[in-house]
Structures are given as C-alpha cells and as structure tokens.
Amino acid sequence: MIKNKTKLYIKADQINSICTSLGRNITRDYTGKELVVIGILKGGLIFLADLIRNIDLDFKVDFVRLSSYGHSTQTSGKVEIHLDVSLDIKNKHVLVVEDILDTGITLDFFIKHLQSFEPASIEVCTLLDKPSRRRVEVSAKYIGKKIDDHFVVGYGLDYKEVCRNYADIYQVLDPSIL
Ligand code: IMP
Ligand code: MG
C-alpha cells in the first residue's frame, strides 16, 4: 500500500475543524447573495462534500473536471476541461472549491474561463495551499492550510489516481515512487 511509504500529515479531525471554520466564514460572506459553488473533480470531491455541509445557506452546486497533470506529479502546464460548468452562473457569486493550489496554472486557466460567463464575483476556497510552488499569480480568499513543498495524498488527493479514499492526508516520503 502507498500508505506504507508516507507519514501522517493532517489528521481527519483537523480537516474537520478546517471545514467548520471555512464554512462559517463562507456563510457570513455570502448571506443575502446568490451563490454557486463549483467543485473541481476529482480531487476536490471529498473536501467539497464536507465543506458544503458547513455552509448554512441555500445555494447551487456544480462540478467541473479539469486536468493539468496527466499521470505525472509535475504539471504539464496545459489544462484541459473534461466536464464544463452546467449551471447558469451569469450575475451569480461563484465560489470555486479546489483540493490544493500548487503552481496556480489550473486555477488561473479556470478563473479566466469562468470570467467569460460573466458571474458577479469569483472567489476560491482551497483546502491546501503550497505558496512556494506558485508559477502564476493566483490567490484564494479561503485557505484551509498552507503547507510546504511536499507531495500529499488522501482526502481526495491522488497519486496516479489512487489514495483518494484515505480519511487523513499523508506526506509521500519515498520520492522514488513519484
Ligand atoms: P496546479 O495547477 O499546479 O496549481 O495544480 C493543481 C492540481 O495539481 C491540484 O488540483 C491537484 O490535483 C494536483 N496536485 C498538486 N499538488 C499535489 C499534491 O501534493 N498531491 C496531489 N495532487 C496534487
Ligand atoms: Mg489530481
């Protein structure tokens, strides 16, 4: 199991507190506004499921599937849309939910794409942020936790499409598997 080549990095109960706190801030900031939450598949799936249950408002949820990595751990720099926005977001307040903000290339591309639909606002909520890896300027208004430059798996985050089911987040220790 890949888990044997990792060390526990963020425990499920810490992730749970992060979701509670982010949900409270989002509830406060979007009260009285028409909100559409857009989850980025596949990595953002589990975070989105926990986060939205902590947002005490009526809002719509949509999903997109983007990829920039292929099967490597280094970004290819080219983002593809495999599943696009399906709700009408014109004049709506959009909150994009992402698992991890790394180089910023994926979100930079996606935010520019969203702008073409003319939403009232676009903000980003990311569970993890690796600011030291940024290659393009992207900032998230809501950040669960800033981390150093480690490759992490679990809680939706994958290594070659596996490990998404781990309840906690683990740091990959053996770089030879990456
Ligand atoms: P960016 O375009 O470089 O910001 O890449 C963002 C995407 O890369 C995320 O949505 C993840 O799917 C993936 N990614 C970046 N860092 C990690 C990591 O440490 N573990 C797993 N996936 C990662
Ligand atoms: Mg991924």
Image: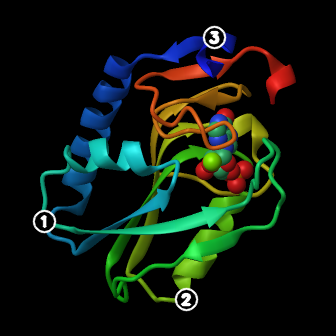
Query: Is residue 122 shown above or below 178?
Result: below
Q: Identify residue type, mark 1.
A: Asp
Could you tell me which secondary element the residue under label 1 belongs to? loop
Residue toward you, 77 or 123: 77
Between marks 2 and 3 in the image, the one whose residue lies nearer the viewer: 3
Looking at the image, residue 97 sits to the left or right of residue 23; the answer is right
**Mark-to-mark CA distance, 2 and 3:** 45 Å
Q: Residue at x 48, y 89 (%)?
A: 117
- Checking the image for residue 116, the label placed there is 2
Q: What amino acid type should be assigned to the residue bearing mark 2?
A: Ser
> Up-down: is 151 above or below 64?
above
The reply to whether dot 1 and dot 2 touch (C-beta < 8 Å) is no
- Viewer can see residue 130: no
Say what amino acid the circle numbered 3 marks.
Answer: Asn
Is the N terminus in the top left, top right, bottom left or bottom right quadrant? top right
Q: State the SS at label 2.
A: loop
